[in-house]
Image: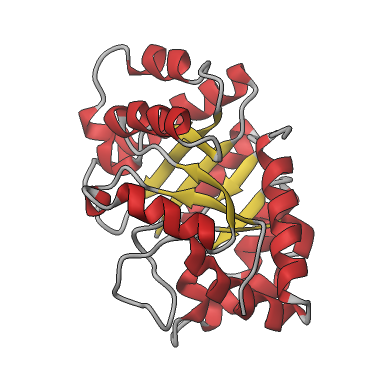
């Protein structure tokens, strides 16, 4: 069954996997019900190119930010660059920012410093944030409770208890194709704990392709499989869930169409 009105709240179409096939991919997802995409920045180059994507494709929005993997590469003045980029018309958030203690590509103290600086920038600009947190729940929650940003914890795969704590801060939770994986028991409990009006649908494409496409390059139309799984858990009509998540995404990022 085909669906309409899909808003992919987190994608990376400036990833090298789309080199040479981007135009074809964009046509494909539009034909398959994708109405809007938020392309997330991970560093300064991807933040700049994300802005360019919004100028090429009217249904694209973007965020700008420094991923924890890239914290060690931050150059002097990076916050001023992000602030200037954030004033572009279709930049709707600071992100993706946060902590990643799984890979530890950047020292943890530096990750926390860069994360805190960007949370402060988001608050200064009155913009929502897109949070990346992997194996860093305690430190992530400490900083969220300190700075009280609005926005979303993306690709959420934590416990239902952590989900409730994040929701209590007024934030949203983003769910990917992980919900379709065989080992997804914990994240399915988190989905159940998340009200339908507080969840976002996302792909994190080209990563996290859902079953039955796991291991392939993910594209925004594959949200259909994620939506079907969540709708089953919520005992909702799939299109109704997609429509609700679309509205949630507009609300989360303050987008007025």
Query: How far across and how far down the image is residue 144, in percent?
Result: 58, 40
Q: How is the image coloured?
A: secondary structure
| Picture layout, residue 188 above or below residue 137 | below
Total residue callouts: 0
Looking at the image, can residue 186 be seen?
Answer: yes
Q: Quadrant of residue 161?
A: bottom right
Q: Is residue 254 left or right of residue 80?
A: right
Say left or right for 28 vs 22: right
Is residue 143 something one can see in this rendering?
Answer: no
Give 145 or 47, whichever is nearer the viewer: 47
| Nearer to the camera, 143 or 151 | 151
Q: Position of residue 34 (x, y in %)?
A: 56, 56
Location of residue 28 (image quadrant): bottom left
The correct choice, above or below, for 93 with respect to 229 in the image is above
- Quarter of the image with the N terminus is bottom right
Task: Locate residue 194, reporting x and y percent.
Answer: 71, 65
Position of 78 with respect to 54 (left or right) is left
Q: In the rendered image of this protein, does residue 150 appear above or below residue 51? A: below
In the image, 14 versus 72, the foreground residue is: 14
| Residue 64 or residue 191, whichever sits in front | 64
- What residue is at 66 percent from the left and 51 percent from the top? 172
Which residue is located at x 76 percent, y 59 percent? 244
Quarter of the rendering occupied by the C terminus: top right
Q: Residue at x 45, y 42 (%)?
A: 39
Counting from the top left corner in percent of width and height, residue 79 is at 39, 17
Apparent side of residue 92 relative to residue 239 in the rendered image (left or right): left
């Amino acid at each position: 069954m085909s669906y309409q009105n899909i808003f992919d709240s987190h994608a990376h179409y400036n990833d090298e996997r789309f080199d040479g096939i981007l135009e074809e991919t964009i046509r494909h997802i539009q034909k398959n019900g994708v109405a809007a995409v938020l392309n997330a920045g991970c560093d300064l180059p991807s933040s700049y190119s994300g802005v360019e994507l919004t100028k090429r494709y009217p249904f694209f929005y973007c965020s700008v930010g420094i991923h924890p993997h890239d914290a060690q590469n931050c150059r002097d003045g990076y916050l001023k660059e992000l602030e200037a980029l954030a004033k572009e018309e279709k930049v709707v958030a600071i992100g993706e920012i946060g902590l990643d203690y799984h890979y530890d590509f950047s020292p943890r103290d530096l990750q926390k410093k860069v994360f805190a600086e960007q949370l402060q920038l988001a608050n200064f600009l009155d913009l929502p944030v897109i949070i990346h947190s992997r194996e860093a729940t305690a430190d992530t929650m400490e900083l969220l409770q300190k700075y009280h940003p609005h926005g979303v914890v993306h690709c959420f795969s934590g416990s239902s208890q952590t989900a409730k704590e994040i929701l209590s801060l007024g934030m949203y939770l983003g769910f990917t194709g992980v919900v379709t994986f065989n080992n997804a028991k914990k994240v399915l409990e988190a989905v159940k704990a998340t009200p339908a009006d507080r969840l976002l649908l996302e792909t994190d494409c080209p990563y996290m392709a859902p079953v039955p496409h796991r291991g392939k390059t993910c594209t925004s139309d594959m949200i259909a499989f994620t939506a079907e799984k969540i709708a089953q858990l919520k005992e909702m009509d799939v299109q109704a869930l997609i429509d609700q998540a679309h509205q949630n995404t507009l609300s989360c990022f303050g987008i007025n169409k």
